[in-house]
Amino acid sequence: MKREADCQGNRDEELQLTEAIGQVARDAGKIILSAREIENHTTVKSGHANFVTEYDKRVQAFIFEELHRILPEANFVGEEDGAEQFRPEYREGYAFVVDPIDGTMNFMQGLDLSVISIGLLREGEPWIGVVYNPYRELLFSAVRGRGACLNGEQIHCSREPLSRSLVEFGTSPYYPELSKKSLAIAGEYLKRGADLRRFGTAAWDLSLCAWGKLGIYFELRLGLWDYCAGALIAMESGCRVTDIEGNPLHFQGPSSILCASAGAAEEDYLPGEILEPQGE
């Protein structure tokens, strides 16, 4: 009986921590919704079409401060720190992985399609994930081994075949050398799926897979902060999430990603020969 009570206590602590992280995301979302004259607060980072706004930095600073109150012993990995290398200390204890505004270009253009992504690694493995869309007040969350939720209600991925599913893809715009291959794979999926979509935010795309709205999502290069939380949420909803070649995600830095719903994963959904070097 004591062991069962201890396990229940651990589960309650996990849920309380997830709820606390979710509240941080909701509060940070208010900063995004308050944004004005974004074009006057934007600078260019290294790489093609890679922008950052003062709001990205402000949201990240707020999130880091609040998460430190919740779990002061944790390390922090944020997109606006610019460090893509996975450090050895991230494999020990806890590490928050944060994308303060995933979909910065959408944010800059006033498209109201950007999300806050907060992942929590434990001993280098994904443990908790939270993705929040402040425009629609949609909070996706997951705890490893406990399923995925939307606003507190459990969700599951789609079981529809690929032929009746939407395919979402990212173009890895910071890496123009991947454009040709990205579009070739998208074209192949257009033949297999019902249609294509491109939303411009990986964390949202992965959450839509978890919610049962998409059958496939892929992108050829993402930072850890782009996929950490969303990949866990998708996995916990029943999706199969790997790199583009079908290998397990390592959650240790940049990676390609391929997310397939339960229905799509029952088929031959891997890009296959499209990944082979193409003649110029």
Image (spheres, rainbow, N blue to C red):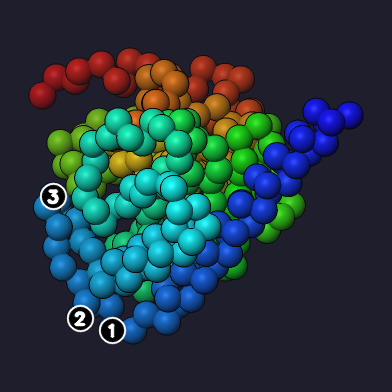
Q: Is residue 204 above or below residue 43?
A: above
Determine if residue 108 is in view.
no
Residue 40, numbered label:
2
Residue 72, numbered label:
none
Number of on-image labels: 3
Discs 1, 2 touching: Cβ within 8 Å: yes
Task: Indicate the secondary structure of the residue bearing disc 1.
Answer: loop
Task: Indicate the secondary structure of the residue bearing disc 2.
Answer: helix
Residue furthest out toward the front: 2
Q: Nearer the viewer, residue 40 or 28?
A: 28
Q: Is residue 276 above or below residue 86?
A: above
Residue 24 lies, in percent from the top left, at: 52, 64
Residue 91 lies left or right of residue 214; in this view the side is left
Residue 25 lies left or right of residue 95; in this view the side is right
In which image quadrant can residue 22 be found?
bottom right
User: Which residue appears at 37% of the width and 19% of the height?
Assistant: 245
User: Which residue appears at 34% of the width and 66% of the height?
Assistant: 61
Residue 96 lies, in percent from the top left, at: 43, 47
Disc 3 packing (10 Å; few <14; some 14–19; many ≥20): few
Amino acid at circle 2: Asn
Determine if residue 7 is in view.
yes
User: Which residue appears at 57% of the width and 33% of the height?
Assistant: 235
The numbered mark, 3 or 1, whose residue comes first in the sequence reads 1
Residue 47, numbered label:
3
Q: Quadrant location of the N terminus?
A: top right
Q: Nearer the viewer, residue 106 or 229?
A: 229
Disc 2 packing (10 Å; few <14; some 14–19; many ≥20): few
Residue labelled with disc 1: 37
